[in-house]
Image (cartoon, rainbow, N blue to C red):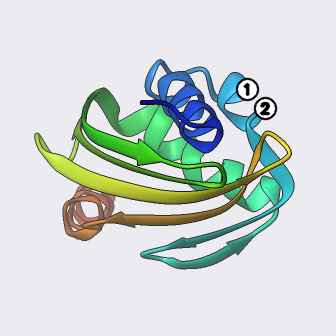
Amino acid sequence: MSSPALEIALAHHRAWTRKDLDLAMSYIADDVVCDAPAGRLNGIQAYREFMTPLVERFLIRAEMIASFGDDSTALLMYNTETVPAKSAPAAECVTVRDGKIVYNRFVFDRTPFDEFRRQQAQAAS
């Protein structure tokens, strides 16, 4: 079963997991709010800056586990394989209004990414 919010959430997910950040950002509202493990992000530019390292440097592939939605809300759970972590499960609960994601509650474990950055910083020292 599909829903308007789920269609937008899945289109956004497909775009960024195919490393097409420009297309992915076309599904994001200018005034988007994203609550992520690192804290709250406000606006499309902050959201893009948050997504860019994942998409451009870390992402190897992603596999959808489950997705559900209704008229305004969608929930995606997926597993990503990344440079820092072979398995990095994540979930996003998004609110969609007028065909754009206006809110994203993005949940994932930052530990492998923080450790990867720490190791890179030590290697550069």
Residue 73 pos. (x, y %)? 57, 56
Residue 58 left/right relative to 97: left
Residue at screen point 49% across, 33% down: 13
What amino acid type is highlighted by mark number 2? Ser
Reading the image, the residue beneath label 1 is 22
Residue 44 left/right relative to 19: right
Q: Are the two marked residues, 2 and 1, in contact with CB atoms closer than 8 angstroms? A: yes
Q: Nearer the viewer, residue 5 or 86?
A: 5
- Residue 120 appears in the rendering: yes
Label 2 and label 1: CA atoms lie apart by 7 Å
What amino acid type is highlighted by mark number 1? Asp
Q: Residue furthest left?
A: 86
Mark seen at residue 79:
none
Q: Quadrant of the C terminus?
A: bottom left
Instruction: Please tell me whether residue 23 is drawn above or below residue 9 in the rendered image.
Output: above
Residue 26 left/right relative to 92: right
Instruction: Please tell me whether residue 4 is drawn above or below residue 113 in the rendered image.
Output: above
Reading the image, the residue beneath label 2 is 26
The quarter of the picture where residue 21 lies is top right
Residue 80 pos. (x, y %)? 25, 39
Give the number of marks.
2
